[in-house]
Image (cartoon, rainbow, N blue to C red):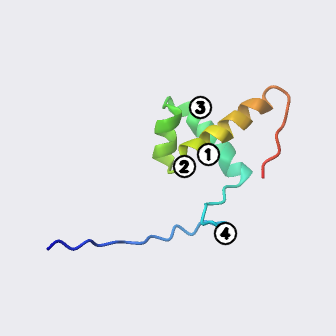
Amino acid sequence: MDTNTIELVDDQTKRDARSRRITSAGQRAELLALYQASGLTQKAFARREGVNFHTFAAWLSKHRGESDGVRPEWR
């Protein structure tokens, strides 16, 4: 019979009550800049960086809205 081994790694990031990683506005801006320079698709970039695709797409949408002169509030 095979045995499964699980390794838990604590990445020392802040988490909310639902265990979601808390990302600062600065970290989001850095990731968006890296994405623009990467040449990757949104999905590929999000996967590479370990960010949920839908979360990343929302960040990008808000960022693009800023360039239209409307600055959305980050939660």
Given the current orientation, which residue lies at the most extreme top position?
68
The residue that appears at 14% across and 74% down in the rendered structure is 1
Side of 10 relative to 17 (left or right): left
Side of 4 relative to 29 (left or right): left
Mark 1, residue position: 55
* Marks 4/3: CA–CA distance: 31 Å
- Between disc 4 and disc 3, the foreground one is 4
For marks 3 and 1 on the same chain, the one whose residue lies earlier in the sequence: 3
Give the total of numbered labels: 4
For marks 4 and 3 on the same chain, the one whose residue lies earlier in the sequence: 4
- What mark, if any, has residue 22 been given in the picture? none
* Marks 2/1: CA–CA distance: 7 Å
Residue type highlighted by circle 4: Ala
Q: Secondary structure at mark 4?
A: loop
Q: Secondary structure at mark 1?
A: helix
Tag 2: Cα neighbours inside 10 Å, few (<14), some, or many (≥20)? some
- What mark, if any, has residue 51 been given in the picture? 2
Side of 16 relative to 47 (left or right): right
Q: Nearer the viewer, residue 36 or 7?
A: 7
For marks 4 and 2 on the same chain, the one whose residue lies earlier in the sequence: 4
The residue that appears at 26% across and 71% down in the rendered structure is 4
Q: Position of residue 71 (x, y in %)?
A: 84, 37
